[in-house]
Image (cartoon, rainbow, N blue to C red):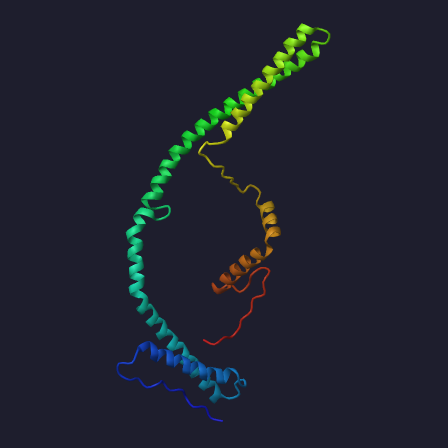
Amino acid sequence: MTYDAYTLPPKTHNQDPFALVKQEIEDLFDEAKNFADGEPINSQEMHDAIEKLYDGLHEAGKRADAMRIEEKKPLDDAVQAVQDKYNPLIQPKKGKVALGKDALGTLLAAWRKKVADEKAEAARLARVEADRIAAEAQAAIRASAGNLEARVEAEELLEQAKQVEKLARRADKAATTGTGLRTVWRCTLEDEGKALDWAYGRAPERFREMVQSMAEETVRAGMRSVPGFRVWDDKVAA
């Protein structure tokens, strides 16, 4: 059986370049399907025909991609022009809005923290006073047994303790709301071994993907022995 070499479609004047490369790739793809859906290579002649087809697809693809880049270049340039116009103003972390907000936010956060700390201290002192008066009232109640006048005084002290308790609760609320601050939880690595054990147990598949990627990068760089991996060579079409 003989295999005819694929020939490029004839070009005509004024024909759309995209239509030409599209037709070329589609024709090559149809030819490729005939081989791919058939029998394995069984002769040098068949190999050469498929190789020519492979190279043709590769070159047509390169030309199509170059055309794509050229065709969208005006759009890329227009998008970049818009980005360049607005970036000095609103680029995340670098624009004037972000830089200005960051600088002002530092000042605001410092002042708000100072106010919040003062409110927290006032709330703490109010709580201490409330607890003191409540303990004093309870002691007076216990000591007033059989003494009506002392009992009246103890009840008045207990009422005072309730009022101070209300003030303490208001101070607590004032210290924790309307501060203009938000809580941000952070963490710092201190025990690498424990952290790695925790992370692996939480998402082992992510660890395997990362380690596989690191091993492949190392092999591509020329290393032929990677601990825990079997390294071998394979042959693929160039």
Count the labels in the image.
Answer: 0
Instruction: Find residue 158 and report its horizontal and vertical position in percent.
Output: 62, 15
Question: Farthest right residue?
Answer: 146
Classify the position of the C terminus by image quarter: bottom left
Between 147 and 86, the residue placed more toward the observer is 147
Q: Residue at x 37, y 48 (%)?
A: 92
Instruction: Find residue 119 and report its horizontal and vertical position in percent.
Output: 48, 25
Instruction: Find residue 172 and report its horizontal and vertical position in percent.
Output: 53, 26
Q: Residue at x 36, y 43 (%)?
A: 98
Question: Farthest left residue?
Answer: 13
Q: Residue at x 32, y 62 (%)?
A: 76
In which quarter of the view is residue 139 placed?
top right
User: Is 225 on the left-hand or right-hand side of 116?
Assistant: right
In this rendering, is residue 109 above or below 138?
A: below
In this rendering, is residue 186 above or below 229?
A: above
User: Is 161 on the left-hand or right-hand side of 27?
Assistant: right
Instruction: Find residue 213 and report its horizontal and vertical position in percent.
Output: 52, 60
Question: Farthest bottom residue?
Answer: 1
User: Is 43 on the left-hand or right-hand side of 61?
Assistant: right
